[in-house]
Image (cartoon, grey):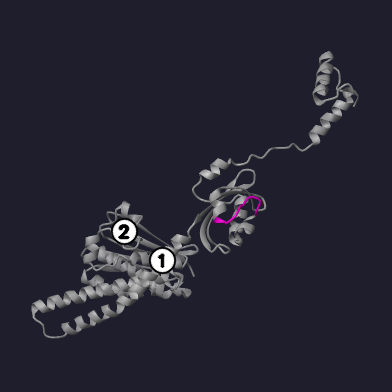
Amino acid sequence: MALFRRAVSLDEAISVIHAALAANPSAPLPVDLQELSASLRRREPLRAVPQPPQDILDAFPEPVGVLESGCRFIASNAALDELLAGRTVDRTVLQATRCAELDEAVARALSGVCERREVTLPGLSKTVQAIATPLPESRALLMIRDLTAQKRAETVRRDFIANASHELRTPVAAITGAAETLLAMSLDDGERAFTEMIARHAARLARLTSDLLDLSKLESGQWPLEMGAYDGITVCESALALVKERAAAKAIHLGADVPPELQIRADARALEQILVNLLDNAIKYTPQGGRVTLLGDGAGDHVIVSVIDTGPGIEPRHQQRIFERFYRVDGGRARSDGGSGLGLAIVKHLTQAQGGEVGVESGRGGSRFWVRLPAA
């Protein structure tokens, strides 16, 4: 270009431009300078994409990696490389883990959706919790928590409880049978009192072993569910009939308010056990002469069944843990009533197994336990 013929370097060319403009600022730009400006505007600007600082990734205690489009790792910490048994940078999620479900989660995160999944890495025989979070510049952050040891410990604990419960059933049944035989005989008052105590505690132990077995089956997925459509009134009346005698013993009024058109999609045996456990729990904690009511209501695609009592209520600090196994709001009272501490835990697991939710609302006027299940 004519303007730059005297210049042999870029710096000299810029100096020539400055000198020409200083000599005559109002003069039109030379043609070659206009061509250079147009070329610069047409050129795609090169933008440096910042890389995540490695020291920040290494500061994470959990395995962490950053991915770009194509689900390809562009950065990782040493914990991730160790978990996946090799350097992950420049490898895709599928290449590093052979897990299509994890690849799908990362792809959704790259599209802007946060994903949290529990998956099994087939090549490594590991169970992990993966959290994929969207980042700017069309990237995603993947954090992995190894759950393999935790899952193995849960399996060992569950198997131990199931095996112990099975072993306990035979001696408990023998003790119960012996106590019932003795009670049928002629006994003096002292002998009868001791025998009744044996029978009472044997029955409590039998309930405990039965509940432990049910809970173990639920946690291991061995509780077979047969989902179907059931009439809400029929199911509720059946559950009320099973607890009628216990309510009558405390002069508690049982009531029900269920719409005739209410249809529930559930497993019949599981639903009945849910309602019986909730009703039994309400009767246990409702004072003499109180009221327990079973309500049913439709809410769009779901049905809500509630058990309302007029008991003393549950303090807020207990409500978050009330569905944990063996958790007792009033341990001494619950034990004296013969409870196993597993009833509400079984309610939670049965409800979740049927695709539902369970919760509690409580105050000084009583408590409301509710179960939300799919409508038929």
- Judged by its main secondary structure, the magenta piece is loop
Tell which of 12 and 100 is nearer to you. 12
Name the residue beneath numbered marker 1: 349
User: Looking at the rendering, which quadrant does residue 353 occupy?
Assistant: bottom left
Figure quadrant of the N terminus:
top right
Tell which of 276 and 73 is nearer to you. 73
Q: Is residue 13 left or right of residue 167?
A: right
Q: Amino acid at mark 2?
A: Ser
Helix, strand or loop at mark 2? strand
Name the residue beneath numbered marker 2: 367
Residue 339 against residue 128 in the figure, above or below: below
Tell which of 288 and 62 is nearer to you. 62
Q: Which mark is residue 145?
A: none
Q: Nearer the viewer, mark 1 or mark 2?
A: 1
Q: Is residue 47 left or right of residue 214?
A: right
User: Looking at the rendering, which quadrant does residue 245 occupy?
Assistant: bottom left
Residue 25 against residue 160 in the figure, above or below: above
Q: Where in the figure is residue 362, as x and y percent of width and height?
A: 32, 56
Q: Which residues are magenta?
A: 83-91
Q: Residues within 10 Å of mark 1 (few under 14, many from 20)?
A: many
Which residue is drawn at the image coordinates 21% and 83% (left, top)?
178
Is 223 one of the magenta-colored residues? no
